[in-house]
Image (tube, helix red, strand yellow):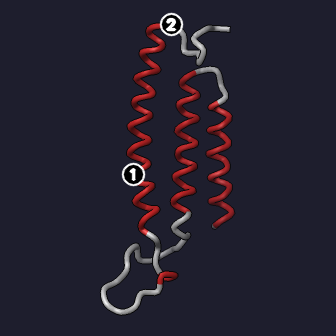
Amino acid sequence: MELVLSLGIGALVGSGVWLLLRPRTYQVIVGLSLIGYGVNLFIFSMGRLRVNAAPVLPEGGIPDPAAFADPVPQALVLTAIVIGFATTALFLVVLLASRGLTGSDHVDGREP
């Protein structure tokens, strides 16, 4: 399970970096989104990979921390998803305004 998660994170971040180096602004935005998704998976994995585990501690008794999933990374990832969606929407608005002003969607504003 850890190997599959590591390969998924590596593929997302690697694809994002490759797209980030492209000359078109839309590809840069998609690359930033893919890097964000890879970072979200990494943060989510920091809460331990547990299957069929309760997300919070039960009432009464002494809890065993190894038997439960950590809810803090889950909350951080949920917040990061919302912030990532908002910044992607802002980037798209700036992209459309830049394309309207320059007539090109290249990062430097000039066609080769």
The answer to which image quadrant residue 58 occupies is bottom left
Instruction: Name the amino acid, label 2.
Output: Gly
Q: Secondary structure at mark 2?
A: loop
Q: Which residue is painted at 40% across and 73% down in the image?
A: 55
Q: Which residue is painted at 55% across and 36% down in the image?
A: 32
Q: Which mark is residue 65?
A: none
Q: Which residue is painted at 55% across and 70% down in the image?
A: 48
| Relative to 79, residue 71 above or below | below
User: In front: 52, or 87?
Assistant: 87
In front: mark 2 or mark 1?
A: 1
106 left or right, relative to 52: right
Which residue is the extreme one toward the left?
59
| Relative to 54, residue 76 above or below | above
- Location of residue 6 in the rendering, given as x and y in whole percent from the top left corner: 66, 58
Q: Which residue is mark 1?
A: 79
36 left or right, relative to 97: right
| Gap in angstroms between the C-alphas marked 2 and 1 | 35 Å
Q: Secondary structure at mark 1?
A: helix
Give the mark nearest the N terminus, 2 or 1.
1
Q: Which residue is mark 2?
A: 103
